[in-house]
Image (spheres, rainbow, N blue to C red):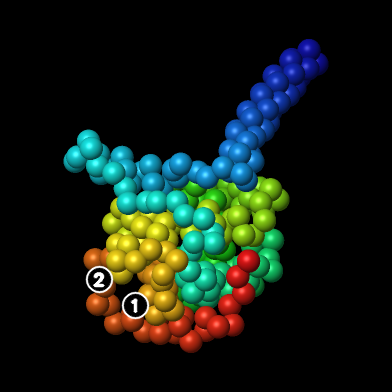
Amino acid sequence: MRLLVSLWKLFSYAAGTAVLGLAIYEFWFLAQILYWVDHNPATTKVMDVRLHALRQKDPKATLEQKWVSYQRISNELKRAIIVAEDAKFVEHDGFDWEGIQRALEKNQRRGKVIAGGSTITQQLAKNLFLSGERSLLRKGQEAILASMLEATMNKRRIFEIYLNVVEWGENVFGADAAARYYFGVNAAALDSVQAARLAAMLPRPRYYDRNRESAYLANYSDSILVQMDAAQIP
């Protein structure tokens, strides 16, 4: 009996320590998110990874990225991204359950993971904090972070951060850097055709940076363009 009591105490201590450690770990994420409600992130996990790789070759290397306010980003680009990435963004609570179901069915038909069903909020959570590895554990953490973002920020703030940190090509991040890199204009000056093109690149931005004449990219851009008028933006 004494052995069982000792084992139970040991188990309880280990479990309690693990729970406390997890709580501290998640609170660290929440504290950063709360700070970003009113302050702009200086960098993201994805940006840090890209910059580290660049500096292995050139210690002075930098990324192309400039923060611009929500009002200084073309509404055409906002509409295009809603069409391409998350049509129900203004309605859902961070998760598009119908979209997730469609992605699961598509993956089952193909026998491999080709669609994720991630919302803009989930993508932002991943970009801000997580590595590129695919696992159930990482997906679970992404869901927790997305819930934190939705609980603490309004849709406009979530979208503003996303537009400023999303990857748009080889070492190009954010709407303003992308607009200047591809079209020589600022983010506010993007027209509907340019916006549709940038939105079409988002699933594979570095690939399409290298393959700008892709027929699929052109066709997808046209598809986005015809749907943009109906898109709801925050």
Residue at 38% over, 63% down:
186
> Where's the N terminus, which quadrant?
top right
Tag 2's secondary structure? loop
The mark that comes first in sequence, 1 or 2, is 2
Residue at 41% over, 48% down:
46
Residue at the farthest top position: 2
**Image quarter of residue 54:** top left
Q: Relative to 168, is 32 above or below?
A: above
The percent position of residue 64, horizontal first and vertical second, equals 32, 51
**Image quarter of residue 180:** bottom left
* Residue 11 shows in the view: no
Q: Tell me, yes or no, whether the two marked residues, 1 and 2, touch with CB atoms within 8 Å.
A: yes
- Give the camera-side residue of 100 and 87: 87
Residue at 24% over, 66% down:
210
Q: Left or right: 34 with respect to 48? A: right
**Category of crowding for the residue at label 2, using alpha-carbon neighbours closer than 10 angstroms: few (below 14), some (14–19), many (at least 20):** few
Which residue bears the numbered disc 1? 217
The numbered dot on residue 211 is 2
Residue at the farthest bottom position: 226
**Residue type at tag 1:** Leu
The percent position of residue 71, horizontal first and vertical second, equals 54, 62
Residue at 19% over, 41% down:
57
**Category of crowding for the residue at label 1, using alpha-carbon neighbours closer than 10 angstroms: few (below 14), some (14–19), many (at least 20):** some
